[in-house]
Image (cartoon, rainbow, N blue to C red):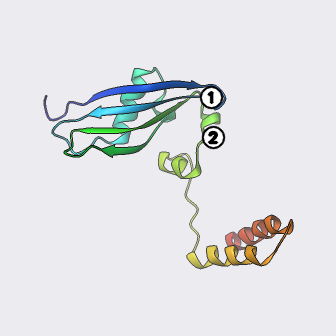
Amino acid sequence: MSDGAVLVKTRKFMKNPLLARRQMIVDIIHPGRPNVPKKELSEVVGGMYKADPKLTILFGFRTKFGGGKSTGFCLIYDNEESMRKFEPKHRQIRGGFMEKKEQSRKAMKEAKNKGKKVRGTGASIAKHKAKRAAAEE
């Protein structure tokens, strides 16, 4: 195999209609390359399943000892609305669907400690107010 050749195989394919997605494990064979960029893989997997590469989420890749093979997880959402609804925020930020909100370390700690002081049913309300106050600063 040449330097740029990559073989992509999927296994444990499953349709998940409740979350409006298809999910599978992806095995990548990439001899002569340390690893393969997720952007490149999303285009390949999206093409395999006739899906939009933007709605193809790849994560959790681990390269096998000795290199040449990696395994990870793939989710292909049916539409962007369901992807925004069910996908965790950190993966949406990685995919470019959301902007990361910068917040100082001190503001986060103050919000956390303010929430700890209130007990009972008012705790969630106090945490929400503390987060709002920290965001305004």
Residue appearing at x 58%, y 62% in the figure:
101
Within the image, what quadrant is residue 110 found in? bottom right
Mark 2 — residue? 86
Residue appearing at x 13%, y 28% in the figure:
1
Residue 123 lies, with reference to residue 43, above or below; the image says: below
Provide the secondary structure element on which disc 1 rests.
loop
On the image, the x and y values in percent for residue 20 come to: 62, 28
On the image, the x and y values in percent for residue 83 come to: 60, 37
Cα distance, mark 2 to mark 1?
9 Å
Mark 1 — residue? 20
Instruction: Determine crowd level at label 2: few under 14, some 14-19, many 20+ residues with C-alpha closer than 10 A.
Output: few
Q: Are marks 2 and 1 in contact (CB under 8 Å)?
A: yes
Provide the secondary structure element on which disc 2 rests.
helix
Instruction: Farthest residue to the right: give it.
Output: 121
The kind of residue on which mark 1 rests is Ala
> Which quadrant would the C terminus be assigned to in this image?
bottom right
Q: Which mark is residue 44?
A: none
On the image, the x and y values in percent for residue 10 come to: 38, 26
Residue 137 in sight: no
Within the image, what quadrant is residue 86 found in? top right
Decide which of 38, 15 is in the foreground and name it. Answer: 15
